[in-house]
Amino acid sequence: MTGRQALWLATFGSVTLMAGALAFQYIGGMPPCKMCYWQRYPHIIAIAIGALALGLSNRMLTLAGAAAALTTSAIGFFHAGVERGFWEGPTSCTSASIGGLTADELFDQIMAAPIVRCDEIPWEMLGLSMAGWNAVISLALACLWLLAWRRA
């Protein structure tokens, strides 16, 4: 595989993941949580970098694309861990312990809670949630970006 082919595949991979996320949101009726949005931003950046890199043939851009893919992969792994209860996520989108709260404090917490929680798995396949799949696929995309960099 040439560096240009790897660059095309890496860019197309982010396009495909974004299209899938939007399809789940608008066709599947699964609105994203806050951490889902966080995973989208690096893909958008990777798509823009890929378009630039394909036009300019700049090796440094491929490293930036790899960094974007690694960033979304890391967020995806963190989000998957939150979904599985391995660690707590941001208090703004996960449920916290309600022990020791007064009725008024609990009511305020419920009223301030977002509609879509980050610690619930809305869909999974083969034991991986969407966040988990994003983490794994984005890690593979980072490898493609690095291959493009190496062969440029």
Image (spheres, grey):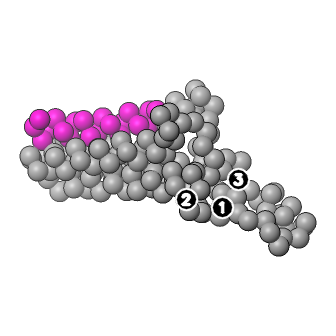
Reading the image, the residue beneath label 1 is 92
Reading the image, the residue beneath label 3 is 114
Tell me how far mark 1 sits from mark 2, CA to CA: 17 Å
Question: Residue at left 86%, top 61%?
Answer: 107
Q: Which residues are magenta?
A: 1-20
Question: Residue at left 32%, top 37%?
Answer: 13
Question: Residue at left 15%, top 50%?
Answer: 149
Circle 2 crowding by C-alpha within 10 Å: few under 14, some 14–19, many from 20:
few
Percent of width and height locating residue 61: 21, 53
Query: Amino acid under label 3?
Result: Pro
Tell me how far mark 3 sits from mark 1, CA to CA: 7 Å
Q: Is residue 37 visible?
A: no
Sooner in the amino-acid sequence: mark 3 or mark 1: 1
Secondary structure beneath disc 1? loop
Circle 1 crowding by C-alpha within 10 Å: few under 14, some 14–19, many from 20:
some
Tell me how far mark 2 sits from mark 3, CA to CA: 21 Å
Secondary structure beneath disc 3? loop
Q: Are marks 3 and 1 in contact (CB under 8 Å)?
A: yes
Does 100 appear in magenta? no
